[in-house]
Amino acid sequence: MIAIEEVSKRYADGTVAVDRLSLQIPNHSITVLVGPSGCGKTTTLRMINRMVEPSSGTIRVNGEDILRRPVNALRRSMGYVIQNAGLFQHRTILDNIATVPRLLGWSKQRARARAAELMERVGLDPGMARRYPYQLSGGQQQRVGVARALASDPPILLMDEPFSAVDPVVRRGLQEELLRIQSELGKAIVFVTHDMDEAITIGDRIAVMRTGGKLAQFAAPDEILSSPADPFVEEFLGADRGIRGLSFLSTRELELDRSQVFPVDSDWKRIAGRDEASSSVLVTDAGGKPLGWADLATWSGDVEALEPYGQSFEVGRDSLRVALDRAVLAPNGQAVAVDGAGQVLGVAGQETIAAAIRLARQRRAADAPQDASKLKAAP
Ligand SMILES: Nc1ncnc2c1ncn2[C@@H]1O[C@H](COP(=O)(O)OP(=O)(O)OP(=O)(O)O)[C@@H](O)[C@H]1O
Ligand SMILES: [Mg+2]
């Protein structure tokens, strides 16, 4: 949908911000521009909506050179979200969101109805409609910024470090919200960040840029993690790219151990008498939900006295990265696997997870990397 072809930007003072950049940005996907400060991310984004004019090269949207489009019409076909939301301080939340529909000539009533609908979509309490931006938290303001960008339902969304001013927990929530909205709306989203974790979490494709406005690598996140193009990309990914790469491996084929799992109303005498090596068992409630670990040699049968099992992971939804994390954090090294309803499917120790990682890697190596379907999972 957006084709950036050999585009360069040299500012008046001679700074080359972007150097012969070529990128194909497809519809229905999130393309992330990532790279160190000053590498030309914002400049690239602003060239797409013509807030900055390229010095050379061409940008096409659906095949048409954007220089041929009236600049106002072009900008209204693109929602734009920036850091700190960039809201109009003297307008209410509702009127901020209704800005572009009003510019497009919608009646006040229709624009406000649309704004109210968008508040709901981005997870804002309707009670906030009449407040002013300063009466909202940073994370709430970012949601307003996203709602405002979506108001006229533009096919393209340009987002420049939209979530970088909020704390990690709020940020994670905003990222999830964006993914949910995208799964419903299927926009072409260009998202700028200098946080590689954010890029991996939300990107379908990631363009890694280096200082001087040059493209270092353009690929799916799992490919960038498993085969960085050069030492610059590798260093940018940081020391734990191996662990991060596990975010793309499914827990579906993990070999779960069921032999240590028992409901609380079991015949404990018989279980204690079995001649299996492990005397540690996971006790579940009658509905199959985990309660905690019991050492059969000492446990009295009191549910209150069970050892905590930590956090569980959901088979299929969570990645091997999550499963490994749970196992590492669990006091006995065993991660508890549950289904979508929270019922225990079994447990997996670190060794089991390591074996699954090796198996998944072998499978991946056998597949063509570009066919690898992407698993969006919490890191
Ligand atoms: N109007 C301007 N005139 C001159 N140089 C500029 C102008 N705007 C940006 N630059 C320079 O162009 C380069 C790229 O800037 P840009 O804002 O695109 O970087 P960025 O990747 O978005 O950085 P950050 O992560 O810090 O936001 C920088 O060296 C910057 O100083
Ligand atoms: Mg920038």
Image: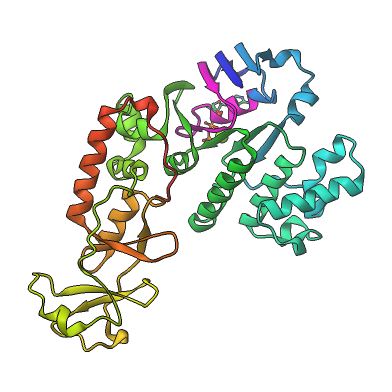
Please name the residue shown 68% across and 51% down the image. Answer: 121
Point out residue 174 in the picture as x, y percentages from the top left corner. 57, 51
**In this rendering, would 72 be left or right of 355?**
right
Point out residue 328 in the picture as x, y percentages from the top left corner. 25, 59
Point out residue 29 in the picture as x, y percentages from the top left corner. 55, 32
Query: Is residue 7 shown to the viewer in this render?
Result: no
Please name the residue shown 61% across and 55% down the image. Answer: 139
Can you say whether 207 is above or below 55 in the image? Answer: below
Numbered range of the magenta stretch: 19-47
- Please state the quadrant of the image where ligand 2 appears: top right
Which residue occupies the foreground of this view, 261 or 266? 266
Scheme of colours in the image:
rainbow
Can you say whether 364 is above or below 379 in the image? Answer: above
User: Which quarter of the figure has residue 368?
Assistant: top left
**In this rendering, would 115 be left or right of 41?**
right
User: Which quarter of the figure has residue 250?
Assistant: top left
